[in-house]
Image: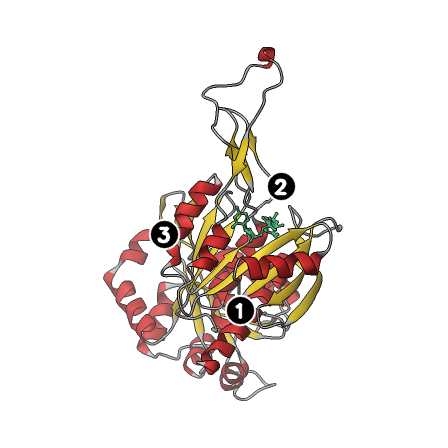
């Protein structure tokens, strides 16, 4: 999504400037053309050579270059986004007041591109009313502020003011630059495999890691959605998502039912057990008692229940984990569970489905549209799934 975009990375004079180097590297790895601009203060903390070596072009620091008579206007006009890492109290104040004191503040005033600032400073400075007032002014003007974290600061004291982690900064850049086609929509995603208790220590489980569900959640967030994840696993939570933690199919059913009425899009990526023990034994079944007879019963089919009670305007997406007859089985589930889209993966193939970082899928829509996505990372699969959802919803909108 970021590939080919042009980002001016402004670095100002705070100790967190060294972390801008990592942010720069990650942006370049994602295919971004990074144009680095450093203030005089930043040069006290990191060398130009470091940033020039990692960015897409040499660092610029001055308004008065011989190569370009108006560097600030060009940089501002050509950028898809201006990112400031870290943003000091001075930079925030100058930007809020409209002061063009150096190349970076000139670029900020001479651009129409979105601006993301990542403040980092001591807690006392962060909490100062002047700084908070300036930030409020910038927010009102549409500047995106990545709030600092709480943690150990330079000098060893603990408090708010530590630069946000690089992944949070990157997520915000993605969110701001990405398509906003899910803006205003609530997406509910299930992730992970359910665990049905046999006794106090044993469960019937499956190999779902939750990676595919979390990738869909992250992609939906970056496209502007509000996201709830009903999850059986503890993966890092994509910034901004709300997680409801569950274990069994029955708990997942209850959690999703509570969210379903307000959901615009539901994606069931979880691997839900089809059967569970009729009753879990209290305590641990003792080996000495011989091989136990475990009687199973069906779990609730969450997706089928959602399909049977689907509110108008909701888009319902299921997954199908198959080991043979992929298309026929997927089409049967699509119709039986009254879905708008089913994402079928042949989990017997190498690199596909459970636990892998990659997947390969066939997307089958209720309107008959079928497409395939060859083996790729789960985020790219998530993108294809949500592209299909948007196509279906646009079709529905224009039909209605
Ligand atoms: O989590 P990962 O390690 O990243 O792996 C991803 C995945 C392989 C789990 C994912 O890509 C996937 O295929 N998820 C669906 C797994 C599954 O349970 O498929 P199924 O064909 O058995 O079920 C069909 C659909 O009905 C699924 O959307 C499932 O969530 C839903 N279902 C199934 C049973 C049940 N009792 N209730 C349900 O809602």
Of residues 135 and 106, the one nearer the viewer is 135
Of residues 338 and 281, the one nearer the viewer is 338
Image location of residue 179, percent across then percent down: 51, 73
Q: Secondary structure at mark 1?
A: helix
At x 52% / y 87%, what residue is drawn?
70
Horizontal side, residue 279 vs residue 332: left or right: left
| Real-space CA distance between mark 2 and mark 3, rounded to the nearest whole angstrom | 26 Å
Q: Is residue 89 above or below residue 202?
A: below
Q: Is residue 110 above or below residue 273?
A: below
Under 8 Å from ligand 1: the CB of mark 2? yes
Q: Secondary structure at mark 3?
A: helix
Q: Is the residue marked by circle 2 packed among few (<14), some (14-19), or many (20+) residues within 10 Å? A: few
* In the image, farthest residue toward the right: 350
Q: How is the image coloured?
A: secondary structure
Q: Mark 3 or mark 2, which is nearer the start of the sequence?
A: 2
Q: Is residue 15 above or below residue 76?
A: above
Number of marks in the rendered image = 3
Q: Is residue 178 above or below residue 13?
A: below
Location of mark 1 (residue): 389
Q: Is the residue marked by circle 1 packed among few (<14), some (14-19), or many (20+) residues within 10 Å? A: many
Q: Secondary structure at mark 2?
A: loop
Residue 287's mark? none
Location of mark 3 (residue): 258
Location of mark 2 (residue): 207
């Amino acid at each position: 999504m970021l590939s080919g975009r042009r980002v001016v990375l402004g670095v100002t004079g705070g100790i967190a400037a060294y972390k801008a180097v990592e942010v720069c590297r990650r942006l370049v790895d994602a295919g971004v053309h990074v144009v680095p601009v450093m203030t005089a203060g930043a040069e006290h903390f990191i060398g130009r050579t470091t940033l020039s070596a990692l960015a897409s072009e040499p660092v610029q620091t001055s308004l008065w270059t011989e190569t370009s008579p108006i560097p600030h206007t060009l940089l501002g006009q050509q950028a898809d986004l201006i990112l400031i890492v870290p943003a000091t109290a001075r930079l925030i104040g100058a930007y809020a007041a409209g002061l063009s004191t150096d190349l970076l503040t000139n670029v900020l005033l001479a651009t129409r591109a979105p601006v993301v600032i990542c403040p980092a400073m001591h807690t006392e400075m962060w909490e100062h009313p002047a700084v908070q007032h300036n930030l409020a002014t910038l927010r009102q003007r549409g500047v995106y502020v990545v709030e600092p974290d709480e943690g150990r600061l330079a000098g060893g004291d603990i408090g708010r003011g530590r630069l946000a982690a690089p992944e949070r900064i990157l997520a915000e850049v993605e969110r701001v630059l990405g398509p906003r086609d899910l803006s205003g929509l609530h997406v509910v995603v299930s992730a992970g495999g359910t665990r049905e208790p046999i006794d106090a220590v044993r469960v019937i489980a499956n190999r779902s890691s939750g990676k595919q569900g979390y990738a869909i959640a992250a992609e939906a967030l970056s496209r502007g959605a509000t996201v709830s994840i009903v999850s059986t696993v503890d993966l890092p939570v994509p910034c901004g998502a709300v997680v409801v933690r569950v274990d069994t199919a029955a708990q997942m059913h209850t959690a999703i039912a509570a969210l379903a009425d307000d959901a615009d899009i539901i994606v069931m990526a979880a691997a839900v057990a089809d059967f569970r023990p009729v009753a879990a034994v209290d305590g641990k079944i003792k080996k000495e008692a011989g091989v136990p007879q475990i009687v199973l019963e069906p779990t609730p089919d969450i997706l089928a229940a959602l399909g049977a009670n689907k509110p108008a305007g909701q888009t319902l997406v299921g997954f199908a984990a198959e080991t043979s007859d992929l298309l026929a089985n997927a089409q049967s589930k699509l119709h039986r569970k009254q879905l708008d889209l089913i994402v079928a993966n042949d989990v017997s193939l190498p690199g596909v489905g459970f636990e892998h970082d990659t997947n390969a899928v066939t997307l089958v829509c209720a309107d008959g549209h079928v497409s395939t996505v060859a083996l790729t990372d789960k985020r790219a699969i998530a993108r294809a799934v949500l592209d299909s959802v948007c196509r279906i919803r646009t079709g529905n909108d224009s039909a209605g």
